[in-house]
């Protein structure tokens, strides 16, 4: 499938998965890839994480106002991005959307600017949040919807909360629709449901690892998201897959002998241990990937395991290229979206 | 407690161990392994888990939500008990405990705001974990209680939780609303009315009615909650209480652990030990790598070249990981640091927990568990 077409499948792509699977890294890689295809990309962070800025080699703080991660030209670097101005093609912007900020803006939009600070500091917001479960999630999703409608970016990538919370997060809108009898909050919830259930506007990409528990969880999450939220599912991305390496089939002694290199026992043992470890993990990985494919009828992408512990711009390029290569091998989707129930 | 201790001493001697760290770092498994170790030492141990993976929960006999300890059968001299925290049930118990009458309790339990409180007010789950800890420590008769803490977002942690809940229950605006006739509070009352009008406008008037009912229902109970919260604080500060930081070698997890460590210091406590899970195995030291002879170019050497690349890759990964959590290790010093290597299978049974306990407790202090463990635990037919 064409990479550019892939990136344009929906306006919003929510990247979700359990904690520790490398969600933020995948968000960064997808952003890099989409920007390379000429899209303007806005990354939305929700949980105060800053991994996204360091992946792009910045490492700075991320605020509600947004920050430029990569610019098409040097001139754009000063442009913090805004709700109205379209972002230039090929750029990646990022911003943090917290419920508190979204609420302050929401109240200001409803003529309650003077009140809003006091609502927050007096603890009344905690009371409201308890009275209307999901209100915070609705405010954040409502803000994302507003950005999506404004068309400032070709693609909005949302770094979703960890899986358990993602379900609550995404089902908050339909839950509120059932509960709220009226008022602006209900309207907001209805708009959000409309966004989440339109595959041309919003899809979810699930991220997992090629290990037993993460695979179990991603399968479960996929069915739940489709059943409870009615959101369209994009590909499942399996992160940290060891790349194939031909020489791993040869025991160290044999490899040394055929290369005509004399190695002492310690060196041979170290090479062999490292080889066996990786071979074992690769076998497990293959097993899990096959199980994932069998249990979840969604297109699969793999991102390579990187031996570096930190993700910077260089690693990001490798990951983006690898995702793009994987997308190239996917077949064209028949409908606009996939279903795990098909 | 400034003297450095070993992990073995913690499991053998302490009465309370709190495991803290971000989500996805193997905190639950670590907590269960520590409790298992205590049972292996002949102690009566209980692990309070928050959200165990299903198969681990099954193997611990926690397939149904049980808010009281269940003993796990096994061949160890002590006892191992486990429970899965039910924050809502724990809160309900508290309400029953402090209500003046069963009518007051029922009034609270059926209130809409109360019903949503455990899910919506951040910190409630943490507070209930601490509450459960207090209850078990007070009434359970255990030698050791190990508490797994909820995966926190925004690094809000259990230390803040009791204060947050108390602040919520003491909310001035609603308190004032309940006694609008007191002249001295009239000015405040006007402001409160404004705020409530704002809420009504956005969320609907029934919310305000619910809230007022809620606070009225709680009238007179805050004192009990506050006293209880203060006792939990005292318990956490006891020298027999230990905090184990659990992290993975990823930057975000390390950041979180550093934050926890500073929070503990702020509260006059400190991290007693650090456990770094899922570290890349190390197969060779630097001198061995430096001494490797050059691999000749060409087809004959290609397999060997791949093997060397592989070994170098793992070594480099291990080096970078060490660097990632190096500051954290320095930060918690002289607390002991244990590293648990990446295992080849998930831990989801007692055998797997025993493997982890072996890795953690065979050696003392800052030692690296040797080589890659093969995770013999796997009975993975699932």
Image: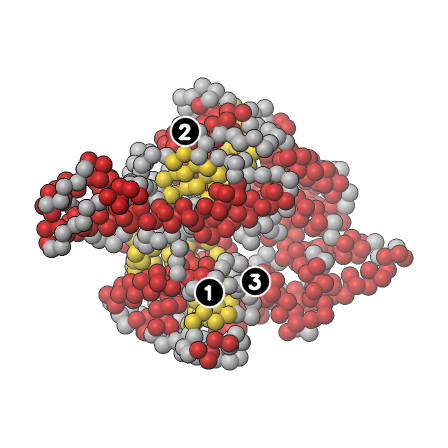
Quick check: B180 left or right of B89? right
Instruction: Give the labeled residue for mark 1.
Output: A58
Q: Which residue is mark 3?
A: A98
Element carrying mark 2 = loop
Mark 2–mark 3 distance (CA, rounded to whole Å): 44 Å
User: Tag 3: Cα neighbours inside 10 Å, few (<14), some, or many (≥20)?
Assistant: many
Disc 2 sits on a residue from what chain?
Answer: B
Q: Residue at horizontal 42%, vertical 48%?
A: B323
Q: CA distance from mark 1 to mark 2?
A: 41 Å
Q: Quadrant of the C terminus of chain B?
A: top left
Where in the figure is residue A273, as x and y percent of width and height? 24, 39
| Mark linked to residue B213 | none
Q: Position of residue A22 (x, y in %)?
A: 40, 55
Q: Which chain's residue wears label 3? A: A
Disc 3 is placed on an element classified as: loop
Contact, CB < 8 Å: mark 2 with mark 3? no
Q: Are marks 1 and 3 on the same chain?
A: yes
Q: CA distance from mark 1 to mark 3?
A: 21 Å
Q: How many numbered marks appear?
A: 3
Q: Mark 2 or 3, which is nearer the eye?
A: 2
Image-based side of B331 in relation to A321, left or right: right
Q: Is residue A38 left or right of residue B10?
A: left
**Residue B262: percent from the left, percent from the top?**
58, 46
Can you identify the residue that label 2 sits on? Answer: B363
Residue B178 visible in the shown view: yes
């Amino acid at each position: 499938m064409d990479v550019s077409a892939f990136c344009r499948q929906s306006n919003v792509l929510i990247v979700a998965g359990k904690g520790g699977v490398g969600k933020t890294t995948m968000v960064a890689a997808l952003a890099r890839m989409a920007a390379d295809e000429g899209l303007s990309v806005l990354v939305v962070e929700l949980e105060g994480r800053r991994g996204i800025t360091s992946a792009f080699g910045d490492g700075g703080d991320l605020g509600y106002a947004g920050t430029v991660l990569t610019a098409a030209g040097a001139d754009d670097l000063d442009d913090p991005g805004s709700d109205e101005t379209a972002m230039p093609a090929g750029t990646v912007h990022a911003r943090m959307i917290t419920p508190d900020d979204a609420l302050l803006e929401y109240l200001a939009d409803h003529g309650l600017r003077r009140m809003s600070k006091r609502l927050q500091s007096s603890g009344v917001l905690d009371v409201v949040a308890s009275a209307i479960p999901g209100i915070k999630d609705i405010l954040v999703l409502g803000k994302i919807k507003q950005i999506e409608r404004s068309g400032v970016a070709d693609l909005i990538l949302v770094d979703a909360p960890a899986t358990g919370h993602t379900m609550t997060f995404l089902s908050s809108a339909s839950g509120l629709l059932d509960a709220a009898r009226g008022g602006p909050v209900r309207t907001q919830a209805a708009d959000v449901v409309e966004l989440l259930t339109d595959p041309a506007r919003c899809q979810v990409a699930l991220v997992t690892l090629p290990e037993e528990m993460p695979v179990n969880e991603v399968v479960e999450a996929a069915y739940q998201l489709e059943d409870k939220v009615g959101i369209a599912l994009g590909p499942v991305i399996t992160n940290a897959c060891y790349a194939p390496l031909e020489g791993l089939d040869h025991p160290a002694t044999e490899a040394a002998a055929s290369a005509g290199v004399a190695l002492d026992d310690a060196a041979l043992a170290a090479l062999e241990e490292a080889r066996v470890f990786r071979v074992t993990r690769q076998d497990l990985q293959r097993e899990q990937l096959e199980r994932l494919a069998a249990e979840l009828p969604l297109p699969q992408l793999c991102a390579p395991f990187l031996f570096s512990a930190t993700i910077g711009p260089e690693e990001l390029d490798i990951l983006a290229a690898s995702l793009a290569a994987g997308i190239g091998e996917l077949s064209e989707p028949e409908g606009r979206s996939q279903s795990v129930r098909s | 407690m400034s003297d450095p201790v070993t992990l073995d001493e913690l499991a053998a001697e302490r009465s309370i161990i709190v495991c803290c760290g971000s989500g996805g770092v193997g905190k639950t498994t670590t907590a269960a392994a520590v409790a298992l170790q205590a049972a292996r030492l002949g102690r009566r141990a209980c692990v309070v888990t928050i959200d165990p993976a299903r198969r681990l929960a099954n193997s611990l006999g926690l397939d149904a939500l049980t808010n009281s300890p269940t003993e796990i059968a096994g061949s160890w001299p002590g006892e191992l008990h486990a429970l899965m925290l039910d924050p809502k049930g724990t809160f309900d118990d508290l309400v029953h405990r402090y209500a003046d009458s069963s009518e007051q309790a029922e009034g609270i339990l059926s209130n809409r705001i109360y019903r949503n409180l455990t899910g919506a007010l951040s910190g409630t789950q943490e507070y209930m974990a601490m509450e459960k800890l207090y209850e078990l420590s007070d009434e359970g008769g255990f030698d050791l209680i190990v508490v797994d803490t909820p995966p926190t977002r925004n690094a809000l942690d259990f230390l803040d939780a009791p204060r947050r809940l108390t602040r919520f229950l003491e909310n001035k605006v609603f308190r004032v609303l309940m006694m609008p006739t007191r002249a001295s509070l009239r000015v405040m009352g006007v402001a409160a009315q404004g705020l409530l009008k704002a809420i009504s406008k956005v969320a609907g008037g029934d919310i305000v009615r619910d809230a007022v009912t809620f606070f009225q229902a709680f009238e007179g109970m805050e004192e009990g909650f506050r006293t209880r919260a203060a006792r939990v604080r005292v318990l956490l500060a006891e020298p027999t209480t230990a905090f184990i930081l659990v992290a993975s070698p990823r930057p975000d997890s390390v950041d979180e652990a550093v934050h926890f460590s500073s929070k503990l210091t702020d509260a006059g406590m400190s991290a007693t030990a650090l456990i770094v899970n899922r570290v890349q195995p190390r197969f060779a030291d630097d001198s061995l790598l430096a001494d490797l002879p050059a691999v000749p170019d060409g087809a004959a050497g290609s397999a060997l070249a791949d093997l060397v690349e592989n070994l170098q890759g793992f070594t480099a990964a291990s080096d970078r990981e060490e660097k990632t959590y190096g500051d954290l290790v320095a930060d918690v010093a002289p607390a002991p640091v244990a590293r648990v290597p990446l295992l080849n299978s998930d831990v989801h049974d007692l055998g797997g927990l025993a493997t982890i306990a072996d890795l953690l407790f065979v050696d003392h202090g800052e030692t690296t568990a040797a080589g890659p463990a093969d995770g013999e635990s796997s009975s993975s037919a699932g």
